[in-house]
Image (cartoon, rainbow, N blue to C red):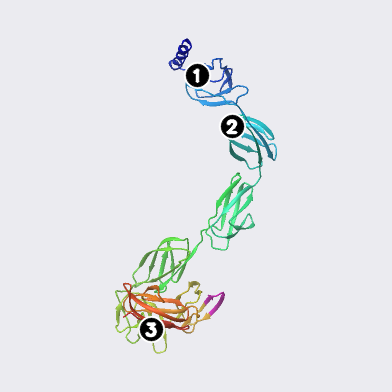
């Protein structure tokens, strides 16, 4: 009973008087900010006064792992010293600095006494890449560790596409992993119009480093339409149509203007798979047609000299010439250009602008167009209207006086009018539908070398 009373009074005194009280193993040596200040008495309780806070407290007793902590105010610390553990470190190369939880232990090869529990180990040597990892040790456990340090960093170059490139002048194919020294390295990309053809990589001194290659490419946006020679403004850059812009994929506002026409402002989305914009500027609410000409709008002959203003596939027949193309319905005279319909696989190039198939162009007499299809390139001097197709890609227009949905061989194609559809030669079943109900259907034969015009649904 007497011993219990003394123990209670001891704890009461701890809180009544400001001091640092340490309860731990008897005979343990106590250090404050690196200096030995006292030894724990046999009852295991040491009281310290007049300390300068904050300070580093360290408790050492032979046969036990050292204990160390930062103390910021008077308090009661119960410290249970644990039995030490050991790590036996070998390395390639030798004489590597061994650091545990930020404390330098020595150089390899050697056996080091450490505290049990979780340790963050670091291994360093000048001229080599440092290595760090965590281990967990049980009391009295001995763990063998072998580390290999290298002078190179494993640089992982990550890309979605397969890209031919060089790094520091050496040919590689991305994505890949290469070994490099820490520091700056130059990556060059080839094969496409990349925005960042040359990319500088700062590689830190770590075992492994990942770099996401910037694969963004420029896209050629082709702008053409009616009327030609209109002023096209994109990203504050002004060009005369037909025009080509080199842009980054994304959203843009395009402005197209021409004297006598209404200015067009439209938001467009440029992607790597869609890069053509065709416009049709409006003149007036009503377009006029010269009665001395035979004019077809969307396949039907015009019987009026005033027609609603909108986009038409137009065919004009004069005494010695036929012309076809897209207009807004204003036909005062037969255009002087010649018409080319291109539906082959590939592209056609005119005045430095490339147009992907299918497309219709209106070209000046004696001008040259370049045709690239099926791996072949051909230059054509234009002296007449031409339809450039083949048995696998015949040109087809589908018309009706009112809008109908169209199915070909049971497959939905679109809504009339449908322009420059590319179909192989052969027989087809055409259906014209309204609200899912077939109104009209017929069999047609598609042929090469002509513009196949299909009517129905009225």
The kind of secondary structure element at disc 1 is strand
**Quick check: 438 above or below 30?**
below
Nearest to the eye among marks 2 and 3: give it.
Answer: 2
Residue 173 percent coordinates (x, y): 61, 58
Number of marks in the image?
A: 3
Task: Identify residue for label 3.
Answer: 316
Which residue has dot 2 on it? 138
Q: Give the labeled residue for mark 1.
A: 21
Can residue 363 be seen by looking at this rendering? Answer: no
The one nearer the camera, 5 or 107, is: 5
Q: Position of residue 359 (x, y in %)?
A: 45, 75
Residue 371 located within the stretch drawn in magenta: yes
Q: Is residue 146 left or right of residue 71?
A: right
Which numbered disc flags the more N-terminal residue, 2 or 1? 1
Q: Secondary structure at mark 2?
A: loop
Compare marks 1 and 3 and give the one earlier in the sequence.
1
Question: Start and end of the magenta stretch?
Answer: 370-379
Q: Is 97 above or below relative to 458? A: above
**Quarter of the image that includes the C terminus:** bottom left
Q: Residue at x 56, y 74 (%)?
A: 375
Q: Secondary structure at mark 3?
A: strand
- 10 Å neighbourhood of mark 2: few (<14), some, or many (≥20)? some
The dominant secondary structure in magenta is: strand
């Amino acid at each position: 009973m007497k011993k219990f009373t003394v123990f209670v009074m001891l704890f009461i005194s701890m809180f009544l008087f400001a001091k640092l009280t340490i309860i731990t193993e008897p005979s343990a040596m106590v250090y404050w900010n690196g200096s030995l200040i006292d030894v724990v008495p046999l009852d295991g309780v040491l009281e310290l006064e007049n300390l300068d806070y904050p300070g580093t407290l360290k408790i050492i007793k032979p046969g036990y792992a050292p204990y160390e902590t930062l103390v910021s105010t008077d308090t009661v610390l119960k410290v249970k010293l644990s039995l030490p553990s050991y790590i036996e470190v070998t390395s390639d190369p030798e004489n590597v600095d061994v650091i545990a939880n930020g404390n330098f232990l020595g150089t390899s090869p050697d056996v080091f006494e450490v505290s049990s529990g979780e340790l963050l180990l670091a291994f360093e040597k000048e001229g080599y890449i440092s290595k760090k990892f965590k281990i967990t040790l049980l009391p009295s456990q001995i763990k063998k560790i072998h580390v290999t340090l290298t002078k190179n960093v494993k640089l992982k170059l990550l890309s979605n596409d397969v890209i031919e490139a060089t790094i520091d002048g050496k040919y590689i194919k991305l994505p890949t992993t290469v070994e490099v020294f820490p520091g700056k390295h130059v990556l060059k990309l080839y094969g496409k119009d990349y925005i960042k053809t040359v990319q500088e990589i700062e590689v830190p001194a770590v075992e492994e480093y990942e770099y996401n290659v910037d694969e963004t490419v420029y896209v050629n946006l082709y702008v053409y339409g009616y009327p030609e020679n209109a002023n096209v403004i994109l990203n504050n850059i002004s060009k005369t149509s037909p025009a080509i812009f080199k842009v980054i994929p994304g959203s843009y506002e395009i402005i197209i203007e021409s004297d006598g026409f209404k200015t067009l402002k439209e938001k467009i989305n440029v992607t790597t798979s869609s890069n053509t914009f065709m416009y049709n500027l409006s003149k007036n609410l009503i377009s006029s047609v010269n009665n001395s000409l035979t004019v077809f709008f969307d396949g039907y002959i015009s019987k009026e000299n005033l027609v609603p203003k909108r986009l038409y596939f137009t065919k004009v027949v004069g005494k010695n010439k036929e012309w076809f193309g897209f207009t807004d319905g204003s036909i005062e005279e037969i255009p002087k250009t010649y018409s080319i319909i291109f539906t082959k696989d590939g592209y056609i190039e005119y005045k430095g602008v490339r147009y992907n198939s299918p497309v219709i162009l209106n070209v000046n007499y004696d001008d040259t167009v370049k045709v690239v299809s099926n791996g072949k390139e051909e230059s054509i001097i234009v002296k007449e209207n031409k339809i450039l197709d083949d048995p696998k890609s015949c040109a087809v227009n589908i018309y009706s006086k009112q809008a109908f949905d169209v199915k070909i061989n049971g497959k939905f194609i679109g809504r009339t009018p449908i322009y420059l559809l590319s179909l192989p030669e052969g027989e087809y079943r055409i259906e014209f539908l309204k609200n899912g109900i077939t109104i009209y259907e017929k069999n047609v034969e598609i042929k090469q070398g002509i513009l196949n015009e299909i009517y129905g649904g009225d």
